[in-house]
Image (cartoon, helix red, strand yellow):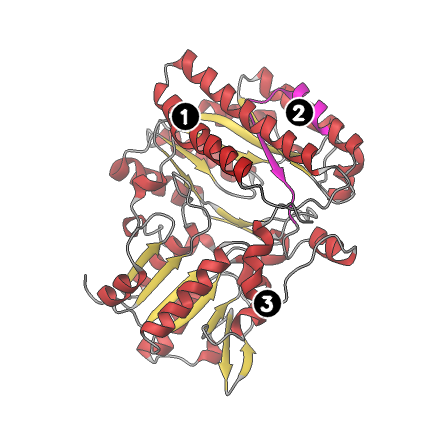
Amino acid sequence: MPDIDALLINPISARVIPAFVPHGLLYIAAYAIRRGYKMRIYDRNTEEADLGNVLKGTNPKVVGLGCLTGTSIDDAIRVSKEVRNINPAIKIVWGGIHTSLYPESILKEDFVDFVVVGDGEEAFCGIMDCMIGNSKSLEAVDNLGYKVNGQLKYNKQSFVDPSDLPQPSWHLIDVKKYMRRKFYAKKTLTINTSRGCPYKCAFCCVPKVHQGKWRAISAEKIVENLKFLRDNYKIDGFQVDDDEFDIDRERVLRFCDLLQGNGLRLKWSHFSRINILKEEVLRREISCGLSLIEFGVESGSPRMLKFLNKAQTVEQVRRAYVVCRKLHIKTSALFMVGLPTEEVGDLKETVRLIKQLNPHLTICTIFKPYPGTEFFDYCIDKGLFRYPDKIEEIGCAYNLNINVSTIPDKTIYGIKRHFDFNNIYQEILSSVFTGNFGLIVYYFRFRLIPDLKGRLRNYFYPRDIKI
């Protein structure tokens, strides 16, 4: 393996099969390659290679890690310390959502040399320009945090135009390990087509990370990416993994025109907001292969929806699903339980609404107070959650069972199990009727059997539930 300029590492967050595509690293690598740098991605969620062997085999000058709040921080710390121990000359860079929210808590650590706040493409290349090319000073690199004689310095923040970015460096990962089998396609990949969100939901950190901005890749570049994935990896479907895909209706319609014009007969899905759904746009998407649309229902309680600052009503939710049933498009309903101030009555309203909507898939999430959100501040102020002072304790804190509502733990976790298994049941039933036996095998192998093992393990080794 030849020497490289930089190694981008995706820390262990969840060893699930298939893994989550590290979109951010794919774009940073592509941007750096366009600037002439030699790059490698090491995804610890999919690769079994030893970190020491990877470092010795590639001899990078810079190592970059992207982090979400949660257990991935534990692995990022472990990796950073090992890199420092193996070769102290390697510069270590942290980026990602958590770093953007808490740059000082990261940069003050001895095992970190630089932090990237916000978009990482130009900032990461700027670091390498200084460390390798000597073409500019650190002070001229936007979105960068660094140390000068023990003092922490931060440069101004700027935003990239996603349409100016090169296509992701898919060749740097083992793509088949990220392919998912869906009811609508056998080989699907997630793609990313925009950044940010103009809405201000109280449970979401995206508005703060992107400062309320929404930026999108052009329809032309999305289709170019899909053609590449179809021709090189034989995908037959894709999932748009954006916080907001269809805000710009003209972009969506242009995208549909290009899908058909380029003969891309792919099945696909995307997330959408209840309050921006337009029947005529949805019809056009369906004509171009849209097979599933996913909505953030969040709660069936009018009081909770207002508290969530969701900008939608229960009646709007019902109307959206009526439109989808009329157009024969399958739906998914994403909702949360265990929200701050949520009571049993609120939960009953949510369960009642979800059953009335009767979506194809139900994604039930137990709320956790993540940094950068209004609810995080609320939970801290009310003493419902203690955020660790030490970075080493963050992963452990989010790995515990958390319930900041007034609802009993048993009820919260029972509701989640109910909807999770109902999900699998619906998928298996649908697969029987469509002859998609591969999906049945997938659920038994990767969902039902592991869940059964987990239940047995928890039965013999119960964990305390801490709030």
Distance of label 2 from label 1 (alpha carbons): 25 Å
* Three-letter code, disc 1: Phe
Image point (69%, 44%), residue name: 403
Give the magenta part as a residue range.
Answer: 350-368
- Label 3 Cα neighbours within 10 Å, binned few <14 / some 14-19 / many ≥20: few
Q: Is residue 175 left or right of residue 332?
A: left
Q: Quadrant of residue 383?
A: bottom right
* Three-letter code, disc 2: Ile
Image point (45%, 31%), residue name: 447
Does residue 121 show up? no
How far from the left and from the top, in percent, is residue 67?
49, 58
* Three-letter code, disc 3: Lys
Q: Secondary structure at mark 1?
A: helix
Asked if the residues shown at circle 3 and circle 1 are in contact, with their CB atoms under 8 angstroms apart, the answer is no
Q: Earlier in the sequence, mark 3 or mark 1?
A: 3
Q: Is residue 323 magenta-colored? A: no
Q: Earlier in the sequence, mark 2 or mark 3?
A: 2
* Residue under pointer 3: 390
* Residue under pointer 1: 444
* Residue under pointer 2: 354
Distance of label 3 from label 1 (alpha carbons): 40 Å
How far from the left and from the top, in percent, is residue 176?
30, 39
